[in-house]
Image (tube, rainbow, N blue to C red):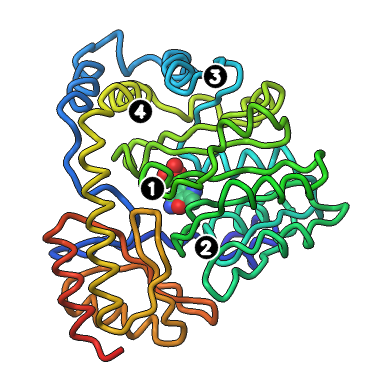
Amino acid sequence: MSTARIRPSLSALPAYAPGRTVPGAIKLASNELSYPVLPTVADAVSEVLGHGLTGLNRYPDNNGTALVEVLAQYLGRPAENIVAGCGSVALCQQLVQVAADAGDEVVFGWRSFEAYPIVSRIAGATPVPVPVTADHRLDLDAMAAAVTERTRLVYVCTPNNPTGTVVHRDELERFLDAVPDDVLVVVDEAYREFDTDPDTPDGVEISARRSNVLALRTMSKAYGLAGLRVGYAVGDAQLIGALRQVAIPFALNTLAQRAAIAALGAEDELRPRWAEVVSERTRVTGALRGHGYEIPESQANFVWLPLRERAADFSRHCEDHKVIVRVFPDASGGVRVTIGSPDENDAFLAAATSYQV
Ligand code: PMP
C-alpha cells in the first residue's frame, strides 16, 4: 500500500472496461473492423520502420501536420479547423479539459459511450447522463432541458454507442437552436461511415456554420486502425487551438500518422468493406428479430440487445460458444455485438439462436 496520497475522488471513478480478448474465441466486443490491414497501410508503416536513424529515433511531428493537411483536403476545411489526436477518446478527455472547470456539468445521453462520464469525472466535472427514449434513441429534448448555467459541454453521439440509433438533421438543428451558444456541443461521429440513413447530420458541415459545435471522428472503426490510435476533431479554429494546448505532447505517434494518411488515401478499397458490414448488419438484425430479440435499428457496425438483467447470462452463453460480446450488466444494460466477418456473424447467430429469449 503506497503512503502517497491519491485523489480520493478517484475511488468513485468507474474504470473503463475494454472489450475482452479470449484466446481461441471470436472477439465481437470492441466495434473493430474484422479485416486485415490494407497492403497500402502496411507498406506505409514498413517504410517508417525501414528508415532507421531518420525514423523512429526522432519524435513525431507534434501537430501531425501532413495528416492534418490530408484531412483538410478530404473534408474541404482549412487545416486550422482540424486537430488530430491519440484516438478520439483522448480528444474526449481534451474536450472536457478545454470546456469544464471543477463542478461544471457535462451532459450526454445514457446509455452512450462509457468514456464520457469517466473523462468528465477525471477533470472534476459533473457528468449529467440523460436517459435515452424507450426506443433507445438519444432524447434531445430531455438533453436540452438538462442544460443549466453550469453546463459547459454536451456530447451527442450519432450513431449512438451502444444502441446504434441516430439523431436526424432537423432534430439536431432544433436542439442546437435550444442550447445556449456558449455551451460546446460535440457531435461524436465515430461510426458515421456505416450510417446509411439519408437524414443523418454531417457534424463537419454543422461545425462550419456554428462555432460552438465540434465534430469528432476516428480512424479506429471504419478505417481499421484501432491499434494505432488516431482520431480527429473539426471545428472553430480557437477551439481547435485550445484542444492542441491541453494535448499530451507527441501523443500521436509517427506510425499512426503515416498509416492514417495511407488509409485515407485507400478509401476506395475500404468502401466495399463498409458495404459488407452494412449488409451483414441487416442480416444479423433480421435473424435476431426473427428469433424474438428486440433489436433497435442500428446505423453502426454493431447491434444492441437490450436484455437488461439477462445481459450477463446471455454474454456467458455466447462465451460458452466461443464468441466474446460486450456486456453492460446494469439496470439500463444489455449486450452490444460488433458486426464482424460473415463467418464470425454466423458463429454469433448460432450462439444467439440457441439461447432461450
Ligand atoms: N467515440 C465513440 C462513440 C466510441 O464508441 C469510441 C470507441 N469505442 C470512441 C469515441 C473512441 O475511439 P478511439 O479512441 O479508438 O478513436
Query: Where's the C terminus, which quadrant?
Result: bottom left
Name above or below for residue 173 compared with residue 230: below
Depth order, front residue of 14/134: 134
| Secondary structure state at the residue bearing disc 4 | helix
Q: For mark 4, what is the residue?
A: 256
Q: CA distance from mark 4 to mark 2?
A: 26 Å
Q: State which quarter of the image contains the N terminus.
A: bottom right
SS state under label 3: loop
Q: Position of residue 180 (x, y in %)?
A: 82, 45
> In the image, what residue type sits under mark 1?
Thr
Say which residue label 1 marks: 196
Cα–Cα gap, marks 1 and 2: 33 Å
Left or right: where does residue 286 sit relative to residue 83? left
Tag in front: 4 or 2: 4
Kindly identify which residue carries mark 2: 15
Q: Earlier in the sequence, mark 3 or mark 1?
A: 3
Specify the quadrant of the image occupied by residue 220. top left
The CB of the residue at mark 1 lies under 8 Å from ligand 1: no
